[in-house]
Amino acid sequence: MDSRILTLLEKNAKLTPENIAAMLDISVEEVEKEIKEFENNKTILGYKAIVDWDKVENDKVTALIEVKVSPSKGEGFDKVAERIIAHPEVKSAMLMSGGFDIALTVEGKTMKDIAYFVAEKLSPIESVLSTATHFILKKYKYEDEIFTKEEDEPELLEI
């Protein structure tokens, strides 16, 4: 399989097989076959746009939540993560090293919604020992894309 195709699609999912074939100097049929295989074996999980939600009306709050867990006997981190990611508020979950075990990205309409999620849905999970919630105030760069500031947006003051 040609990982160069994945690299191009990861950077720009709107590229057509014809575009990719021309860029890599391979046949369109080969590109189509590779993409189909990547989709079938779940190497490509989906295609998404990166949206700067600050530029549109947005009633959404995002938080990063660090979760410290103690998996039950015979139940590893994967089983705990499965219970956590079953909640629709959870947009991403990653096993990590360091002071916490799992990092979550969670969305809600308000900070109160996220607090409710932590207090009523996340913390009661038996294996969850503690959490640390960090609210996203502004995105500067995400998935290699740099978010530009609006002309009338004031500079953040240094303290």
Image (cartoon, rainbow, N blue to C red):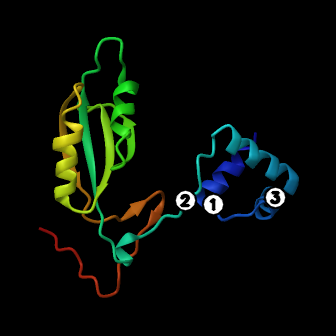
Q: Which one is nearer the viewer's eye here, 137 or 69? A: 69
Point out residue 23 in the picture as x, y percentages from the top left corner.
77, 61
Quarter of the figure with the C terminus: bottom left
Estimate how packed mark 2 is, as few (under 14), some (14 to 19) or many (20 or more) residues with alpha carbons within 10 Å: few
Q: Amino acid at mark 1?
A: Ala
Task: Residue lying at the far top in this picture: please name it.
Answer: 73
Q: Amino acid at mark 2?
A: Lys
| Residue 21 - label | 3
Which of disc 1 and disc 3 is earlier in sequence? 1
Residue 109 found in image quarter: bottom left
Which of disc 2 and disc 3 is earlier in sequence? 3
Q: Secondary structure at mark 1?
A: loop
Residue 140 found in image quarter: bottom left
Q: Which residue is mark 1?
A: 13
Label 3, label 1: how many angstroms apart (C-alpha)? 14 Å
Q: Residue at the location (25% across, 22% down)?
A: 70
Estimate how packed mark 1 is, as few (under 14), some (14 to 19) or many (20 or more) residues with alpha carbons within 10 Å: some
Q: Residue at the location (21% across, 55% down)?
A: 113
Circles 3 and 1 in contact, beta carbons < 8 Å: no
